[in-house]
Image (spheres, grey):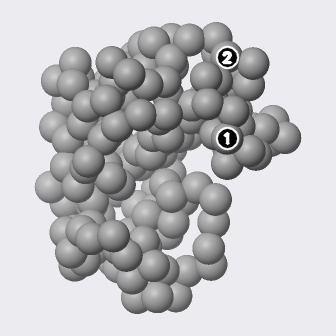
Amino acid sequence: MNLEKDKYIIVEIIPTSLKKENGQVVELTALKVDGLKLIDRFNYRLNKDNVSIKEFTDMCSYDDDKFTYLDQSSDILNEFKNWVEDLPIFIIDNTYTLNYFDDLDNKLELVFPYLDLDFNGNVIQEMIDKYKLEASNYMVDLVYEAIIRHF
């Protein structure tokens, strides 16, 4: 995979549980990138009233209108499945993301090796420091900026 030339997706998912069977997708944000050019953005959230663990609504700052809001997590995942096409998907966290995308046939890879970073509990801060990034609420934006600066 060549991040400078290929088309791919960078994705971040915020679930209420590590396991898909027990949780809800509160937020799913993704970028569709062609080489180093951003070509589309996917911003979906679960309607605030439908989030089972209310602390997640505070964490996701529901005052943002850049999102499309749906009533069911399954609807968000179905919209993503249609949007992603057959493109490779770069994930930010490999612990729980794979559980939520288990029905996708797309290639799923951890993004950090492409940035010469080892995945660990502090990898986001290491990425911010290495590429001199401004902190952001959206990990996909940080990863995209790191990819641009890396290449």
Q: Position of residue 134 (x, y in %)?
A: 62, 78
Q: SS class of the residue under badge 2?
A: helix
* Viewer-closest of 109 and 88: 109
Residue 39 drawn above or below residue 52 = below
Residue at horizontal 61 percent and vertical 30 percent from the top: 53
Please rate how many residues cluster around mark 2, counting C-alpha atoms within 10 Å: few if below 14, some from 14 to 19, many from 20. some
Residue type highlighted by circle 2: Asn
Regarding residue 8, the answer to whether it shows in the image is: no
Q: Dot 1 corresponds to which residue?
A: 55
Residue type highlighted by circle 1: Glu
* Picture quarter with the C terminus: bottom left
Q: Position of residue 99 (x, y in %)?
A: 26, 31
- Which of labels 2 and 1 is toward the front? 1
Q: CA distance from mark 2 to mark 1?
A: 12 Å
Say which label, 2 or 1, has the lower sequence index.
2
* Viewer-closest of 96 and 44: 96
Residue 14 drawn above or below residue 1 = above
Q: Is residue 71 left or right of residue 121?
A: right
Q: SS class of the residue under badge 1?
A: helix
Residue at horizontal 43 percent and vertical 20 percent from the top: 77
Residue 60 drawn above or below residue 116 = above
Residue at horizontal 21 percent and vertical 75 percent from the top: 118
Please rate how many residues cluster around mark 1, counting C-alpha atoms within 10 Å: few if below 14, some from 14 to 19, many from 20. few
* Picture quarter with the N terminus: bottom left
* Viewer-closest of 75 and 2: 75
Q: Which mark is residue 50?
A: 2
Q: Position of residue 73 (x, y in %)?
A: 50, 17
